[in-house]
Image (cartoon, rainbow, N blue to C red):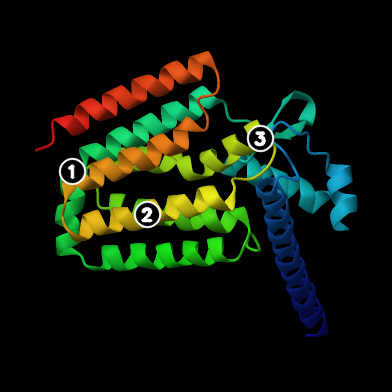
Amino acid sequence: MENMQKGQDAGDKVKLEQYISVSLVDVVTDKIRSNIYSGKYLPGQRLIVREISEELGVSHTPVKDALNRLVSEGYVVALPRRSMVVKEYSNIEFIDNYDQRMMIELYYADEIMKRAKEDPSMLEDMEECYNDMEKFVSSNGELTGLTWVNCETRFHRRYMEGCSNRRLYDLYCKLDTNKSSYMTYLNNNKLPLSLEFLKMNNKEHKELMEAIRLSDSKRFCQVVYGHLIRSCAVYAIDEASQKRFEQMKENAERFIAKIS
C-alpha cells in the first residue's frame, strides 16, 4: 500500500511539473510576442535562445518551446542551422493580401446586410469590439499592440463569419491582415503604428457599423474601400508596390461603380 501511495505521489508530481512547464511556456510566449508587437524585437531580428533566457530569467527549454509556438502562429521563422528570426512582411505580399480581403468583403456586402437583419447579435458583438478599441486608443498606448490586433480581427471577422462559402471564409481568416498590417509597418518604420492612425481606423469601424445598421450595401463597400486603401497607402513606398496598389484601387472602384 505504501509503495502504491509513493507511486501515486510521484505521478502527481510529474503532472504538476508538466502543468508548471506548460504555464511557463505560455508566459514566455506572451512576453516574446509582446516584445515583437512593441518593436523591441524587430522584423528580421535574430532571436537567440541564450539571450532571451537571460533576459527573462528562465531556462533554455521554455524559450525554445515558446519560439516553436510562435513559428506556428506566424510571428517567427525557423531558418537553417536552427536560427530563428522575427518574420518579415514584404509590401507586395501585404498589398496582395489586402486586395484579396477587399474582394471578399465587397462581394459579400449584400449577404452581410441580410445576416445583420436576421441576427442582431452581429452588431452587438461588433459594438463590443469597437468599444474595446476605443479603450485602447484612449489609453495612450498603455495597452499592447496585440490587444488592438485581436480586437480589430474579431471586429471584421464577426461580420464575415456567416459567409455562405466556408472555404472563402477560411481563406479570409488565413490572410490575417490585421496582424500583417501591424507587422509590415514595424518592418518599414521600426516602430508600432501610431495612435492617430489607430484612432482613424476606429472612426471607420464606426462608419462600417452604421452602414450595416442602415442595410446600405453601397455605403458599406465605400467605407471598406476607404478603410483598406488608407491602410495600404502607407506601404506603397516603391515602384513595384505603388503599381500593385493602383491596380487594387482600380479593381475596387470598378466594382463599387456597378453597385446600384
Q: Which comes sooner in the sequence, label 2 or label 1?
A: 2
Q: Which comes sooner in the sequence, label 3 or label 1?
A: 3
Quadrant of residue 205 in the image? bottom left
- Residue 79 in sight in this render: yes
For disc 2, the marked residue is: 205
Q: Residue at x 62, y 41 (%)?
A: 75
Quadrant of residue 119 in the image? bottom left
Q: Is residue 140 above or below residue 88?
A: below
Quadrant of residue 244 in the image? top left
For disc 3, the marked residue is: 189
In which quadrant will I find the N terminus? Answer: bottom right
Disc 3 versus disc 1: distance between alpha carbons? 34 Å
Q: Residues within 10 Å of mark 3 (few under 14, many from 20)?
A: few
Q: Residues within 10 Å of mark 2 (few under 14, many from 20)?
A: many
For disc 1, the marked residue is: 218
Q: Which mark is residue 20?
A: none
Q: Viewed as shown, does residue 7 lie left or right of 37?
A: right
What amino acid does circle 3 point to?
Answer: Asn
